[in-house]
Image (cartoon, rainbow, N blue to C red):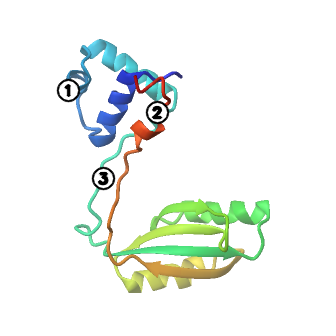
Amino acid sequence: MHLDAIDMRILSEIQEDASLTNAELAARVGLSASPCLARVRALDEAGIITRRVALLDPMLLGADVSVFIQVTLEKQTEALLDVFEAAMAGFPEVMECYLMTGDSDYLLRVVVRDTVALQHFIVDRLSKTRGVANIRSSFALKQVKYKTALPLEQLASPRARR
């Protein structure tokens, strides 16, 4: 799908506030409601918009500990990778999971209420996941930057920036 400047403005606006009504979005991007809705539907159907969510404040909800965990598997076989990834998909504390290059096989971002909950997660669940050989964790002391919006201006093709 070719994205023009209006599509990029639509994406930018809904990344910042997915709760905008179609009329509000249309006004912000300079379209009438009907063509705006058609464009949003096309972006949905193309898979560019994957979902709309509400972002919550973890600290206000008691998730005081954010941890980055590096996991090394015994070996990188397709079967062990599948088992590990399925396990991570089932752990609600795991906010993000990446298959990595380098010293560890996976990098996880885990959010828990306290160190007791982290201990429970690591000892009782993560370490018991089949194939896990090594676990290294690092606590985030302070969140300096967090964003969910993609840098559309930097990702846009030269034609879409016009």
Mark 2 touching mark 1, by CB under 8 A?
no
Give the numbered dot on residue 126: none
Residue nearest the observer in this picture, 55 or 158: 158
For mark 1, what is the residue? 24
Residue 22 appears left or right of 81: left
User: Which label sits on residue 156?
Assistant: 2
What amino acid is at disc 2? Ala
Q: Position of residue 138 (x, y in %)?
A: 47, 80
Gap between marks 3 and 2 measured at Cα: 25 Å
| Mark 1 secondary-structure assignment | helix
Q: Which residue is mark 3?
A: 55
The type of residue carrying mark 1 is Glu
- C-alpha span from label 3 to label 1: 20 Å
Question: Can residue 30 be seen by looking at this rendering?
Answer: yes
**Residue at the spot 25% in from the left edge and 37% down from the top edge:** 19
Would you say the residues marked 3 and 1 are in contact, meaning their CB atoms lie under 8 Å apart?
no
Sequence-earlier tag: 3 or 2: 3
Quarter occupied by the C terminus: top left
Quadrant position of residue 7:
top left
For residue 145, above or below residue 154:
below
Q: Residues within 10 Å of mark 1 (few under 14, many from 20)?
A: some
Amino acid carrying mark 3 in the image: Leu
